[in-house]
Amino acid sequence: MNTAPPQRAGVAGSADAVAPPVRAADWYRRKRTREAMLVACFLLPSLMIFFLYRILPLGWNVILSFEYWSPLKAARFAGLDNYAEMFLEDDVFWQALTNTLIFILASPIAILLALAVALAVNSDLKGAAIYRTIIFLSYPLMSVAVGIVWRWLYDERGGFINFVLRGTGLIKEPIPFLQSFGWALPSVILADIWQVVGFYMIILLTGLQSIPQHLYEAARIDGAPASARFLRITLPMLRPSLFICAVIGILNSFTAFDLVYVMTGGGPAHATELLVTHIYNMGFGETRFDYAAALTVVQFTLLVILTFLANRAVGGNAGSVESA
Amino acid sequence: MQKRRDVLKLAAGTAAASFLPKKLYAQTGTKKLSILTWNIIDMEPLFKQWFATFQSQNPGVEIEWLDKKGPELPAFYQTQLAAGTPPDIVDIQGGLGLEWAGQGALLDLTPMLDKEPAVRARFNPEYLANWVFEGKNYLIPFYVSKSLLFYNKPLFKAAGIDYAPKSLDDILSYAKAVSGADRTGFLTLNFDWLYWPLFRMQGVDLLTPDLKKPTFNTPAGIETADKLAKATADGSINKISWTGRWVEPNGAFAAGNVGMMHAHSSAYFFVKTQGSWITPETIGIAEVPGYWSTPNSHGYAISKGARNPELAWAFLKFATEKSQAMDFARGRTLTTANAEVDKDFLAELDKNDPTAAAVLRTQIEHTDKLTGNWRLSDDSAVKNIVWAEMQNIFLGRRDAKTALADAEKKVERELRRT
């Protein structure tokens, strides 16, 4: 029955001989392709949403910043006019930028405070769990509610803070916290710190609890004092957590819209204006979406630079995934 | 495999269904009317009643009503404009109507008002004229208010004052006399430029009549700003005047520690519920010296991009008719600028609540002296510039002369920009 020529049989035979590994490779490739397709299918909805709601608006925002546009007028190319106006003529932009940077600079205060609290509740302190819960409680509150509460606390005539300060004899005249150019921004920042410190504390507490205890034991055996253990073990091991807090602090400073809006509306006379409130006012208050877009581009650029610097400050590899 | 087909069928069905309503409307002749109102959700039962009546008079009309809270409406309306789907009818407060008219968002109602003089004749002409931009009428009154002066009679009596102030100097000297300890003499609401009558009564205006040049940086302007700053510094004027919006200043007056409050009529109904001291015997009501006032009225407008402008106009006529306007006036205790309705409603209110009637009567008097809104497409930008410098002056950061000179330069630049 074997009618095939020998060479063909030989070819066929040799083909048969190598066929299993080739098929295995194909099967493996197909499996990898199928897996890749599956992964892509799972990722696609998220990527599409990310593209549609993040990348596309961001791109359109950049284009808009180089145009004259309003909802009722066709777009015209503006070149760098919006940016020139921002940098050369808009005093409020510079004020808002300065205030935003001050807001960011206040983040380390909140982080240090949170670190102190985290260290305290991580110790053998009696009732630490209760303190932890109480301190965290401020974070889930709506910023609008926080703003309203603090606005009343700061009230010049009937506010609790002035009542206490006057009652204890620390001041004679009430302080117009939110009506004063000097006090308004620090007052808003304090309210912000109060709200966010609980969240930082939880992040840092998680970091503290993930530090292997044997490092401290070894240091103790070597006679390292508490300060050295803190500086040589705790702080370096907390770097990723500190980075997260720093990034959240930066983001929070750029997006503290609701708190400022409720407490001061950016006033008095822009004393508490942040970039984000200025963007809102330009866009929705004065219907200047083109100019607001240019402001947004500057804010975004600043945000990227600061996040990059924060990453560098903690060693440049924050957020990286270590493979085993 | 079957499951996959089912999912695909479901998706295709859903997609098809989403296109169906438009087709159905086209087939059945259904017309949709969208209405956007500003912070009057409490009037829902009345609105639903109106819609039902209107729909019975206009079969096949479907009404979509949306109400937005104070700060949300402008942002929401602008996103709708950007999306090309503005509501057919929009309720706009204060000077925003003129600004949006100037930007081309609203439909010119003049031809409709000209065609139906009886509709035009319903309204107080000055309130109607308040929404004229470049000779065209863009809004008609929905409900109206303007600023007036409230005063605390017991505090006045204790300070030896027995009549309402007749000038800015009176206001400031009374304020000084009343203030002390935890009391302040005077408060003003500032949002929507309700504070501007304080300047206008001194002969200071913001811009020239042709709206081309600023006119506030004058000796009278500097003197007025300076007086207000000094009175704020010595505690005669409550600082909340220059930083608060609605709740804080009204709350402070309701607490009974403030001699006078310059606010619009709605403030009376707010403070009355909060201040136990407020009775017909204890609260004084007066016009602002010189009878100047800033309107804070609501008007109905039709979006230029309205799908059914004729239907929208028909609804506006319906909503401002005597019967509907009267129901609304009663429901909210306010004036509507429908002259006949306001007259009848005030007569009714005189019997039930004479103090409220006295407050509302000021809203339909001296309407020839409205100030605080300028017919500019960038009204907000100009106001923001001046207001920031005014805050600098009133709260003692800058002297009036320098701050007003700076504000003048910035306003000139803004006017050139547009």
Image: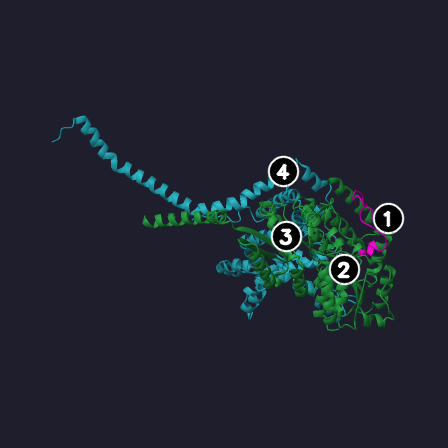
In the rendered image, residue B320 lying in the magenta stretch gets the answer no
Residue indicated by mark 3: B90
Chain colored green: B
How much space separates mark 3 and mark 2, taking CA atoms? 24 Å
Residue indicated by mark 4: A75
Q: What's the residue type where badge 3 is placed?
A: Val
* Element assignment for label 4: strand
Considering only vertical position in the picture, is B97 above or below B341?
above
Marks 4 & 2 on one chain: no
Left or right of residue B415, residue A115 in this image: left
Tell how many labels.
Answer: 4
- Residue B160 at what x, y percent from top left? 87, 71
Chain hosting mark 3: B
Q: Magenta span covers which residues?
A: B197-216
Residue indicated by mark 1: B218
* Element assignment for label 2: helix
